Image (cartoon, rainbow, N blue to C red):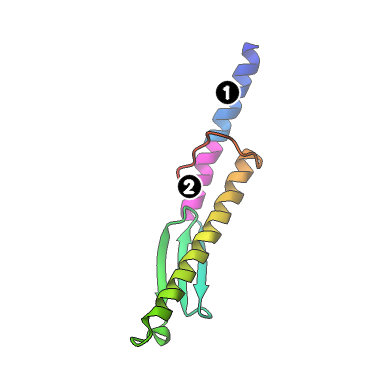
């Protein structure tokens, strides 16, 4: 019984190491969301942190600020959604797609 427990602990340690590697990769990976035909672009990393926002000057209209706000919001949400999908795929490769109760990811 003790040998089985030791093997399980080795597997847990291996999974933890792999999760740390995936977390580093996610911090370096980027995804892009865009709106308005690419007039507003938002880049996020795999941890869902917004890295940059680019707005083409043609879409900046002082008389229609609401449209610009909607485009920025849409692009941000799209980038965050793509980052969340990337996270799920990356972590799924570590856990084998299992939903492990109590496994709190740092993001």
The residue tagged 2 is 24
**Measured from the top left, where is residue 53 in percent x and y?**
41, 70
Taking depth in this image into account, of 98 and 13 the one nearest to the observer is 98
Quarter holding the N terminus is top right
**Measured from the top left, where is residue 93 in percent x and y?**
63, 44
Mark 1, Cα crowd under 10 Å, few <14 / some 14-19 / many 20+, is: few
Q: Over which residues does the magenta segment extend?
A: 17-28
**What type of secondary structure mainly makes up the magenta span?**
helix
The residue tagged 1 is 9
**Measured from the top left, where is residue 41 in percent x and y?**
47, 73
Q: Is residue 28 above or below residue 6?
A: below
Query: Rounded to the nearest whole Å, what is the CA distance between mark 1 and mark 2?
Result: 23 Å
Determine whether, in the image, residue 94 is placed left or right of residue 71. Answer: right
Q: Residue at x 55, y 60 (%)?
A: 82
Determine whether, in the image, residue 35 is placed left or right of residue 53. Answer: right
Q: Residue at x 62, y 45 (%)?
A: 92
Taking depth in this image into account, of 62 and 8 the one nearest to the observer is 62
Q: Is residue 67 magenta?
A: no
Q: Is residue 21 magenta?
A: yes
Q: Secondary structure at mark 2?
A: helix
């Amino acid at each position: 019984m003790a040998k089985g427990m030791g093997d399980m602990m080795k597997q847990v340690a291996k999974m933890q190491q792999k999760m740390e590697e995936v977390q580093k990769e996610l911090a370096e990976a980027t995804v892009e969301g865009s709106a308005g035909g690419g007039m507003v672009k938002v880049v996020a990393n795999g941890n869902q942190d917004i890295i940059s926002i680019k707005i083409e000057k043609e879409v900046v209209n002082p008389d229609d600020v609401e449209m610009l706000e909607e485009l920025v919001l849409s692009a941000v949400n799209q980038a965050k959604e793509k980052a969340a999908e990337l996270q799920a795929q990356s972590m799924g490769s570590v856990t084998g797609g299992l939903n492990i109760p109590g496994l709190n990811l740092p993001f």
